[in-house]
Structure formats: C-alpha cells, structure tokens
Image: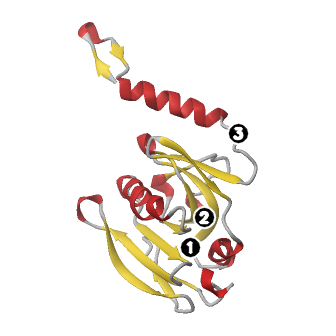
Amino acid sequence: MVMRKHGAMSPTDEDCERGRLEAAWESFECPDGLVAQCFGGAIVMEVHPRTLHDLPIRTMVRQAWPRLEAWGECGLDCGADGKPRADVVFARPDDIDLAWEDWPAGAVQGVCEVISPSSKNHDRRIKAEIYARARIPVYLIVDPTQGLWEIFTLGPADAYQLVGKGGFGEPCELPLPAGAVVVDTTAWRPYSST
C-alpha cells in the first residue's frame, strides 16, 4: 500500500494485481487430471504426478517420530509470495490447527518437494526462494529422476545451503528445529525402475 496526502491509503499496481490473483485463486476450479498451485505471481497447473512421485510422500506421512508429524499435500501461506502446495510439510503436533486451510509458514519445521521433470524449475528455484523468504528452516528435495535426495537448511541472508545428500535406500536425517528425524527411503524407487 502507498500512503497519500492526508494519510489516505491507495493500493499500488502490485497490490491490485496481487488482489486480483488471490481472488482468481479463491474461485479457481482446476480441470480434471491437473493439479494447481498459486505462487510466484501465477497460478501454475501441471499434469497429476505419477505413482512413483507420490511414493516418497506416502512413506514420509506414514512414518512416526516423537515431537513431529509429516502431512502430505499442504497449502502454505507464504504471504505476498502466494500459497504454494508442498508435497510434505513437517510440523510439531502442538503447532497444528486442524482448521487451517493453508498452513502459516511460521508453524512449519520443514518442507519437502518431490521433483517431476515438469516441476524441476519450480521446485529447485522458485519454491526454494519462496520457502527461504518465508523462513522455513529445512527444505528436502527428492528427485526420482536421479534416485537422489538433498537436504538444505536456511543460512545467512535467508538462502538455503546444501547440508546433506544421498541416494534412495540411504537414511535421510533431517535437522529440524524440533529435533532431527531420520526419513526411511528404502521403499523409494527412481522413475527409471519402471
């Protein structure tokens, strides 16, 4: 918002555009066979992912850790950057409100994105920047194309730094603020295994 003479508020062009995008997103109906997200100033639609894309999500959500839960396919409220939909969100049970439509980024310990060939740029660059600006402490990227996972933590200047990587089948230790958890990756399969 921009202040005008005598204290009256007037929206900037950017505020108006953001308002139009939010209104469009709230009334948006995604076509069958596609998934949609609103982030980075756009509504992004992609073909529904393959089963192998969903396998890491399913295994993380089913794992049990003390002091932490994993939830799949959660919308995140990242303020002006929009509402990206994370494949997995890690949070402390006491920080979760079941009434949330979109999870506030401040309640999130970490996020995971499973890369598809069509989403690689979004997940590695655009979402990484959005999650870093929202100050989400840990970002896990799972790449079924390569059969690899990478762990990033928030470093200086709100940018992610690579702190760990490994292959499917290797334990993946996430350094979450509530305490480290080990993600079991033994059931994960690369796309080339089909």
Q: Which residue is mark 1?
A: 67
Q: Looking at the image, can residue 10 be seen?
A: yes
Relative horizontal placement of residue 90, taking residue 40 as reference (left or right): right
Q: CA distance from mark 1 to mark 2?
A: 7 Å
Mark 3 neighbour density, 10 Å: few (under 14) some (14–19) many (20 or more): few
Q: Is residue 83 above or below residue 95?
A: above
| Quarter placement of the N terminus | top left
Q: Classify mark 3: helix, strand or loop.
A: loop
Q: CA distance from mark 2 to mark 3?
A: 31 Å
The type of residue carrying mark 3 is Glu
Q: Are marks 1 and 2 in contact (CB under 8 Å)?
A: yes
Q: Which residue is mark 2?
A: 93
Q: Is residue 145 above or below residue 111?
A: below
**Colour setting:** secondary structure
Q: Position of residue 34 (x, y in %)?
A: 68, 53
Q: Which mark is residue 161?
A: none
Q: Position of residue 103 (x, y in %)?
A: 56, 51
Residue at position x 33%, y 11% in the image: 8
The type of residue carrying mark 1 is Arg
Residue at position x 50%, y 82% in the image: 146
Q: Classify mark 2: helix, strand or loop.
A: helix
Q: Which mark is residue 29?
A: 3
